[in-house]
Amino acid sequence: MSQLNETALGEQLIAFRHELHRFPELSNQEFETTARLRQQLEQHQIRIVDLPLKTGLVAEVGPAQGPLIVLRSDIDALPIEEQSDVAFRSERPGVMHACGHDFHASAALGAAILLKQQEATLPGRVRILFQAAEETGQGAPDVIATGALQEAVAIFGIHNDPSLPPGVVGSKAGALTAAVDRFDIRITGTGSHAAKPHQGNDPIVIAAQIVSAAQTLISRNAPSADNAVVSITQLHSGSTWNVIPDSAWLEGTVRTFSQSTRERLEQRFREIVLGLGAAFAAEVEFNWHAGPPAVVNDAHWADFALQQATASGLEARVVEASPIGEDFAFYQQQLPGAFVMIGTGEPFALHHPAFRINDAVLLPTSRYLAQLAVAALRSLERA
């Protein structure tokens, strides 16, 4: 394998990211993305771990013995129609890399190449996850089920952050992203003529009571020191102006940073909704769909990740927790680690149809990930 200089590697990574961006694939459909990654890894003689994954893959660099550090990236796109003006915009209608997973995968590929170039001196192994289906929250559990984390000592993951300037790495000890739960509520009342509401049981009135009561969930059930969010994002009922419908349906999300608050809000929300159903003599169904838990960074590895950012020439910054969700949290239930945010300094937020990535950040992120993995291995060797 020939050694790439950094200029050539940077150009290769940018071209690869643009290719991924042009051909995005939704969760669990990342077959072409996986094939492209496999081709690049094989080209650089980076071994691929044989694991029963439908999409996505796991690469490994280093000797057969020694401690194991894991780097995680994700590869899936979103069902969004791209509205950016980049020359390499998505060629798949209604599908777009609007969360930067093309950037994450390319940065991890670059880290794998850099690690391969120093493989003979590595004091242990580095396993690089190119994980599918992060957007559904199920990709990480699928990887864990394969045994990919066995023997691993620590895990690190990245996510781009348009709100941070380029060259900034942000993280913190403790909760960094929120637990993401979804709820849906179905109300079955009795329809009637709008002029004779006493002959029915209006589900819209009940839905309105639920919406109002939900606003007290945080203020009266969550400790003031705990951040939490409850948002009702859909309410559907009725089809015309002069008929009271017989049903209504609501959906929304709850975001929490502590497990105790998460459990408390689910319990109280269920009690409130079912209680209002009983009070209005209506049939009410409350469904809670648990998503990924909060990303909770190990204090040692979070500090370590920030220290290595400074050592690699980037600016380290302690950031506030964000209510976005991340299935990286499932890995942290298996072993300690840290999730870090990579500043890209772009004007459009994650999941925006005009979202874009600053390519200048790509190679520095690869260098940072490689250095982080090597430094972690050496710190374990000294311990």
Image (cartoon, rainbow, N blue to C red):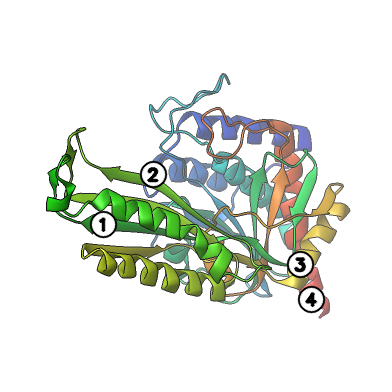
Viewer-nearest of labels 4 and 3? 3
- Label 1 environment density (alpha carbons within 10 Å; few <14, some 14–19, many ≥20): some
- Which quadrant is the N terminus positioned in? top right
Across and down, in percent, residue 227 comes to 63, 62
Q: CA distance from mark 1 to mark 4?
A: 56 Å
Residue labelled with disc 4: 381
| Residue type for callout 4 | Glu
Considering only vertical position in the picture, is 224 above or below 230?
below
Secondary structure beneath label 4: helix
| Residue type for callout 1 | Arg
Residue labelled with disc 3: 376
Residue labelled with disc 1: 186
Q: In the image, is 152 to the left or to the right of 81?
A: right
Q: In the image, is 51 to the left or to the right of 158?
A: left
Q: CA distance from mark 3 to mark 2?
A: 32 Å
Viewer-nearest of labels 2 and 1? 1
Q: CA distance from mark 3 to mark 1?
A: 50 Å
Secondary structure beneath label 2: helix
- Mark positioned earlier in the residue sequence (2 or 1): 2
Across and down, in percent, residue 107 comes to 65, 45
Residue labelled with disc 2: 31
Q: CA distance from mark 4 to mark 3?
A: 9 Å
The answer to whether residue 54 is visible is no
Viewer-nearest of labels 1 and 4? 1
- Mark positioned earlier in the residue sequence (4 or 3): 3
| Residue type for callout 2 | Phe
Secondary structure beneath label 3: helix
Q: Are marks 4 and 3 in contact (CB under 8 Å)?
A: no
